[in-house]
Structure formats: structure tokens, C-alpha cells
Amino acid sequence: MFRTITPIISVVIAITVFFSFTKPMFGEVRDIDTEAAQYEKVLDDTKKLNARLSALVAEKRSHPIQTLERIEAFVPSDIDEVSILADLANMASRNSLLFGNVSLAGQEDGVAARSAGETAAISNQDVTYDSLTHTDISFEVIGTYDQVKIFLADIERSLVLMEVTDLKVTATENESPLQQFAFSVRVYALPALGSSDK
Amino acid sequence: MADISRSSFIPKETPGMVPGRVKRRRTFHVFGFLATSLLVGSIALAGGVYFLKGVSESKLETVKKDLAEQSALFRDEDIAEVREFDRKIRAIELLVGDHMSPLKIFAALERDTKEKVQLVDFEYTYDPGTEAFVNINGGTKTFTTLALQERQFDENAILAGVLFSELGTGDVPSVNDAAEGEEKILNTNDVSFGFKGPIDFGDIRYDGLTPFALPASEFTNETSGDAAADESVTDETSNVTTQ
């Protein structure tokens, strides 16, 4: 009888140990391995991202400072209207032009009025005219045709990008070579991301 | 004395007597063996899984630690720096691609305007990325001259898309005919015309070159291209604002 009972007890214990301990623990091990695999994937991606970011930062900083300054001047973060007017006046002066009748028209409800949601939508890397703010500067110059051509060439090749959006001239009634030219130029800025409250 | 039979001191088997040494039969309890094996195996398996769990947890902790180290290397400032730089480059590409040179229109007019045609009004408008438009008013003496002028402009890549319109004759006021108080228009022509239309972007896109010679400059502004003239302007054809 003893010989019969002992194996039965052994089997019962074996089955109990398996279902109450081994099997649940095996499930835990599987879960841990799954979690570890996910972490490893994230780790791998993070390493790649860090390497790529380091490479991009190094590439950006490899440019000469002058180049970076020119880039900043070409498309600044905000428009310095006073500086631009001074530049225009200087250009006119260098070409012996009379410069005046200045008026400025800023962009209506530009970046400052954007809602947080719109700013988030714009925050992706695609840059369109909607991403830029601009100011239109209207002015008149008086001079000869040739002087104005040189002035116009200076505007076109200015480091601070000035886009001529309007140019008018009407022949004068007298025999003077001096003509009056009405200009409107547009200057742009690219506000930094997250500066919607400026 | 009679012989007395004696028992031998050596015991002798009596028939029917059970032998003193019994050979035992060996039996193998399969069920017991299996049960024991099962128990041992179950315990061993439990131990093995427990050990495996320890190894897995250790591995997980190691990966988490490595991830934390990599995350610490990650700087938001670097991302912002690279992102801003990329945005600026894209903005520059956009703006330079749409940067126009109205001087090219002037150069085309200088080159192809007939000497007997006068251009009185000139207006250039440009909506960046959308449309460039030119509107010119002028006058000449005869329709023949006007027809020749139209043919000349048709051969000009920049002005080919611009159309003559608003033709007028006879009642074009001259300075002497202007009534008192009315704006005096300097126009001694018999035929007036308008010349307006869109300009193709590709024809006047800024390319760093100026379409005429510039004097030596003391300018500090950047020159982005070769400033050597492609063409020079002669006074003979320069009629944009002359009388």
C-alpha cells in the first residue's frame, strides 16, 4: 500500500508545483524578455538618433562663422525695420538719389496671432510663405534713370533679401533727366519655432 | 548390544520440508519510477525557470540603464539648433528661388524699344511666388511703328507674353493742348498704346548677374554673382522715360 500511495503523492506534488509555480513564472519570464526586446529596440534607435544628431550639429558648426552670419542676415528671426531703412537710404545716397516718402506696412496678424494649434502645425520643417513674416516698405526716389538702375541692382543683390514688389515710374513733363520712382520692397523674417507670442 | 540407528549430525532434508534459503524475485515498479522522475523533473524545472527569471531581470535592468545613459546624451538644444538651421536653409531656398530681377525687364525694354516709340508709364508688380505683372503705357507716331514694335517685343523672351492693348489715336493730348488746371502729359504722339501682361518667372529670376555694366562700387552689400555686364546700354534705345 505504501508503494502505491507514494508515487501518487509524488505525481500530485509534481503537478501542483508545475501549475502553481513553474508555469506562472515561465509567463513572467516571457513578459520580461518581451519588455527587454522593446527596450533594446528603443536603445538601438536612440543610439542611431544620437549619432545622427551629433553628425548634423558637427556639420552645421563646420561652416565658417561668416557663412552662418550671412545666413542669419539673409533670413533673420525678426525684421529690423530701422536698419533696413538705413540701408535703403544709404544705397540711395551712394547713387545720388533723393530718398523719401517712406511708409511701412507690416504683415497683418502674423505670427503673433497664431493659435497654439496653428503654430504646432507650422512647426514642421516645411517652410512656406506662411511660415515667414514680412514687412512691405514703400518709398520714392528721385534721380536719373541710370542712377535708379544701379540702385535697383543694389537692392536685388542686397544680403538682406529685399524683394521688389512694386515699381512705378511716370515720365515727367519737363526736360530734366530726373525722374521719380516709387518702390515697394518686401523684407522677410523667419520666426524661430515657439516664438508665436512675439 | 543392538545397533541403534542414530540421526546424522548432518541435517538431512526431509521430503516435503521447505528449503531454508528462499530466492527472492526482483520486481520493477514502473509507476513509482515515473512518479519519482516526474517529481524530480518538476522540481528541476521550477528551479531552472526561477534561475532564468533572474537572468532575464538582470538583462532588462542592463538595457534600461544603457537607455538612460543614451537619453542623457540627448540634448534639446542640439535639436533646436539643427532644426532652426534647417528651416533657415529651406527659407533661403524658397526666397532665392522666387527672387526676381526687374532690371531684366528694363534691359529688355532698352534693347528692343524702337527709337520712335516712347514709354511714358511703367509699372511692375510682383506677388512673390504667384505672379509678376508689367503695365506700360506709351505712344508713337504711326501704327506702322507700333506694329514693328510689337514684332520686336514678340521676339523678346521676357516680353513675348505681354500684349498691346488700349490703342488710341488722334486725341492724345500734348503739353500744349492741356487745359488749364489739367495734368500736363508730355506726349507728342498720335498713337497711344498700353502694353501689359504677366511676366514668366523663369525669364526674370535673379541669377546673380546684372544685365548691364555697373560702375566700380564701394558698396558693402554682398554681390552674389559676377557683376560683369552681359550687355551695355546705349542711349539710342533708352527711351523708357525720355520725352
Image (cartoon, helix red, strand yellow):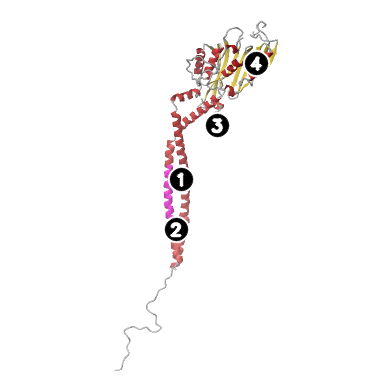
Rendered image quadrant of residue B123: top right
Amino acid type, label 1 = Ala
Judged by depth in the image, the label closer to the viewer, 4 or 3, is 4
List x then y, in percent, for residue A108. Answer: 57, 22
Chain that bears disc 1: A
Amino acid type, label 3 = Ala
Judged by depth in the image, the label closer to the viewer, 4 or 2, is 4
List x then y, in percent, for residue A128. Answer: 55, 28
Segment colored magenta: B46-64
Q: Which residue was labeled with disc 3?
A: A121
Of callouts 1 and 3, which one flags the residue occurring earlier in the amino acid sequence?
Answer: 1
Q: Are marks 3 and 2 on the same chain?
A: no
- The secondary element bearing badge 2 is classed as helix
Q: Which residue was labeled with disc 1?
A: A36
List x then y, in percent, for residue B97. Answer: 55, 25
Q: In terms of secondary structure, what is the magenta stretch mainly?
A: helix
Picture quarter with the C terminus of chain B: top right
Tag shown at residue B42 = 2
Residue furthest to the bottom = B1
Q: Is residue A160 left or right of residue B108?
A: left
Using the image, determine if residue A133 lies above or below residue A24: above
Rendered image quadrant of residue A173: top right
Q: Nearer the viewer, residue B178 or B13?
A: B178
Q: Is residue A63 left or right of residue A163?
A: left
Using the image, determine if residue A139 lies above or below residue A29: above
Tag shown at residue B149 = 4
Amino acid type, label 4 = Gln
Looking at the image, do the residues carrying marks 1 and 3 touch, with CB atoms under 8 Å apart? no
